[in-house]
Image: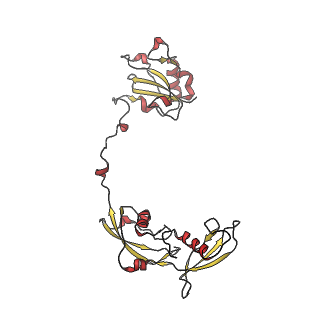
Amino acid sequence: MQEYKQRPDVQLRNLLNQSNTPAIAFDDTNLILGKPSVLLGSPDGNTQINVRGVQGIDYKGQVKVLYNRLDLSKLFQGNYRAEFSALGQSSLHRLLPELNKALGITFTEQDLVNIDLRLLDDGDQVLIELTAKPESIAFTGFTTVLFNRRFIMLTDVVTNNAFAELKHPDPVIEGYTSAGLLTWGMDFTSIIPQLRVRTTAAYYRGNWWDYAALKNALAENFGINDWPSIDASAQAIDSVKLYETKNHPDANTDFSHVVVQTNVRTNGYSGTAFFHYNL
């Protein structure tokens, strides 16, 4: 086996295709590879493996295949220690893409024993032992590589650590409940008739069609007691308006519609209320 840039199971199937004349090419859909075992004293190789056809596909039965696995201790003829650089990772298996790219070999998680790199030295350079698993199709033995570990400093990455999205949505007033946090996630579909809004010119800010009915429905169905009307506001800046949720930037899009009551500041509630429902 000489083409180690390919995945080991692909290598073996390709060798079978190249050394034989199968009526249908061997691939992972029609040929199952067993576990390899050490073969001693054979001129045909140091490894044997049973391969069998996938039931009901192209081939039946099984055969024994003999070949040579690569001894990792003889990698690069032992002339120098392989070396590679990559961002620090928590385990050898997570490093495999960078390791394979640097060495020109395709190791898989089935080939190498995993290592918890968090247990190694904290230095920028560490030695990693690559140990082949007994079930590796292509490799045996072990070798070491030098890992130049790079770290990313958080101070270089996190240059903005203040987020407007995490600010409180309503004015924080002692003794008042946030109208937005109270209502935003609730489903008010069961009281749609009470959420009807007046939109005539006389009610340019909008208003509840039947405020008393809404107030009772909120108390009886949701435990929201003494909900304020917009007429209770000392300033004419509050409003009640109906939106499709897709047309309001702060609406909960799990619902189709929302009635928004703004500038609530009475009866122990403050902020903006969102009465969402689905049609």
**For this view, does 175 lie left or right of residue 13?**
left
Give the number of marks: 0
Considering only vertical position in the picture, is 165 above or below 274? below
Residue at screen point 56% across, 76% down = 36
Residue most toward the top? 202
Residue at screen point 51% across, 29% down = 276
**For this view, does 155 lie left or right of residue 224?**
left
State the residue in front, 107 or 142.
107
Asked whether residue 64 appears in the rendered view, the answer is: yes
Q: Quadrant of residue 47?
A: bottom right
Q: Quadrant of residue 53?
A: bottom right
x and y percent of residue 115 in the render? 41, 68
State the residue in front, 277 or 17.
17
Considering only vertical position in the picture, is 36 above or below 251? below
x and y percent of residue 195 in the render? 52, 22
Q: How is the image coloured?
A: secondary structure
Residue at screen point 59% across, 71% down = 13
Considering only vertical position in the picture, is 27 above or below 268? below
x and y percent of residue 226 in the render? 45, 22
Considering only vertical position in the picture, is 44 above or below 22? below
**For this view, does 154 lie left or right of residue 35?**
left
